[in-house]
Amino acid sequence: MNNDILLKIANSTKSLTKAERKVADFVLQSPHDVMYMSITDLAEHCGVGDTSVFRFCKTLKISGYQDFKMMLAQSLSSNETSSTMTLSDEIDITDSTEEVCRKLINIDIAALNQTLDMINIEDIHTAIDMMADAKLIYFFGVGASSVMALEARYKFARILPNVMSTQDVHMQAMSSSLLTENDLVIAFSYSGSTKDVIDILKRAKQNHAKTICVTRFAESPLTAFADIVLLCGANEGPFQGGALSAKVAQLYLLDILYTEYFKKNYVISNRNKKRTTQSIANKLL
């Protein structure tokens, strides 16, 4: 396949259906925007269904939407001249170290502000109630998101004895199969399209467990199986998997959940925090 996917799209318009041509036209007009869109976002912008976007990829002989975005990013990157090469939309390869420092902090601040704007206070309150009522709280995530799940477990383990997580995908699948209506799952997935996490949340939902997901996209396959959706504001391109700005936004949401839970359950949380702190006090010099 020609590395220039944009040229291939332009040359394939006659073989596309009417709905697929809408997708092709939007991609050709706004390729950089598409790199930061979920399949549902792109479908909505084009006025078509998700299946039309998927068929568009198949017509181009591309296995799926994520592969398409990767090829699009490669195509845009290969078309850059040495003077315009970028590491992201914000950072140019010729930027000085000082400029990189300023730009990175601005990216993180923007991600935090976007997340703040997307917070639904009622959803936060409901999430806290679900955590308080849960017999077991299980944090799930794979790949870069497994780091977030592990961080969530470490944070809440200071005040709660019933938090769990594992980085092994098979163990996650087995654990989700044993959950009950008394348990709660909190799943992390920036894209909301990671198959393993979707399967885990779907299985938990089938077992009548309560479900929360932390993701970038309100309309993604993962959110269909979540009782509560907490949105993080950060733009991550195909070549930026695991971008720290996305983690900063998710950590912010995690900090909100922890602080609000601590407030609402202050007596026991404060007692447990003192006990866990004392238990590791002699580990420090």
Image (spheres, rainbow, N blue to C red):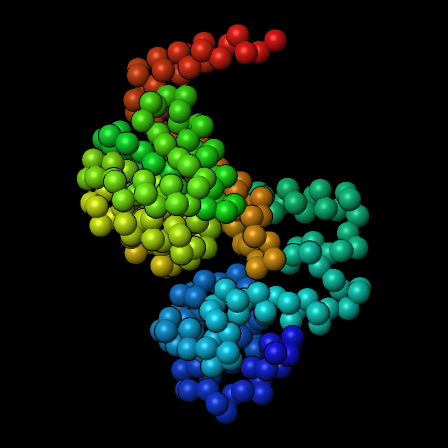
Q: Residue 3: image x %, image y %? A: 65, 75
Query: Would you say 76 lies left or right of 282 here?
Result: right
Which residue is more in the foreground, 254 or 108? 254
* Spot occupied by residue 85 in the image (x, y as percentages of width and height): 74, 62
| Residue farthest along the bottom direction in this orientation | 14
Instruction: Please tell me in which quadrant of the rendered image residue 129 appears.
Output: top left
Using the rendered view, name the quadrant where residue 47 is placed.
bottom left
Position of 126 compared to 60: left or right? left
When the figure is inspected, residue 82 is found, relative to residue 146, above or below; the finding is below
> Which quadrant is the C terminus positioned in?
top right
Question: Percent from the top left, x then y, of residue 17?
Answer: 42, 87
Q: Which residue is drawn at 76% across and 55% down?
A: 93
Between residue 94 and residue 194, name the one nearer to us: 194
In this view of the protein, can residue 227 be seen by the observer? Answer: no
Q: In this view, does 26 lie above or below 173?
A: below
At x 71%, y 72%, the residue is: 79
In front here: 198 or 129? 198
Drawn side of residue 102 relative to residue 119, left or right: right
Q: How many labels does the image show?
A: 0
The quadrant of the image that shows the N terminus is bottom right
x 40%, y 65%: residue:
40
Q: Can residue 73 be seen in this view?
A: yes
Percent of width and height locating residue 111: 53, 46
In this picture, is 127 found above or below 232?
above
Q: Nearest the camera: 186 or 173?
A: 173
Which residue does the image show at 20% across and 45% down from the upper left? 208
